[in-house]
Amino acid sequence: MTRYIRVIFLTCLSVIILTLAIANRELVNVRLLPSELDGLLGIGVSLSIPVFVLFLSGVIFGLFVGFVWEWIREMKHRSASNRKSKDLARVENELNQLKRDTGQNEDEVLLLLNNNQSNR
């Protein structure tokens, strides 16, 4: 069911993007710097692109910046999770070592159950 919903969503999104592209195919001039700075610095980079390309590249750039921002923001959570996972693995290894040293290979709950059954 989710596969069909995903296909329907992507189809609708594609139709919307295609309609946007067809409706906004006029060319616009995009300049690297304002015209006052072009003469001052001698850098006159200008590009003529359709409006929809400018719009979609802005959306893609915004998504990229958002993903990078969130990745950086969540870095402390990932490092804490990794640290806790390492601590847990270390404690489990210590527990297994203690069980081997004491000859207690069974789980404590199973030992209690076995002791209760043998006492009856």
Image (cartoon, grey):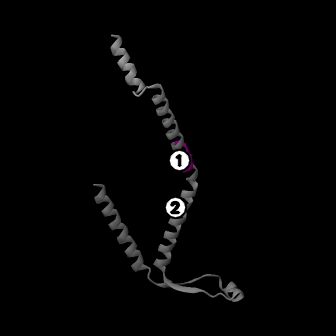
Q: Is residue 15 left or right of residue 30?
A: left
The relative height of residue 91 versus residue 119 in the rendered view (above or below) is: below
Which residue shows up at 46% across the image and 33% down it?
96
Task: Residue at 54% x, 40% y: name it.
Answer: 87
The disc placed on residue 82 is 1
Q: Does the magenta stretch include residue 82?
A: yes
Q: Point out residue 36 in the picture as x, y percentages from the top left corner.
A: 69, 85
Estimate the spatial distance between the alpha carbons at disc 2 and disc 1, rounded to whole Å: 21 Å
Tell me what residue is drawn at x 29 percent, y 58 percent.
3
Tell me the kind of residue under disc 2.
Phe
Any magenta on residue 32?
no
Residue 48, horizontal then vertical, whole percent: 52, 86
Taking the view exactly as shown, the residue that stands out farthest to the right is 40
- Give the mark toward the camera: 2 or 1: 1
Q: Which of 98 and 4 is in front in this view?
A: 98
Q: What stretch is highlighted in magenta?
A: 78-84
> Secondary structure under badge 1?
helix
Quadrant for the C terminus in the image: top left
Residue assigned mark 2:
67
Q: Is residue 65 left or right of residue 19?
A: right
Crowding near the residue tagged with mark 1, few <14, some 14–19, many ≥20 C-alpha atoms within 10 Å: few
Residue 2 in percent (x, y) is at 31, 55
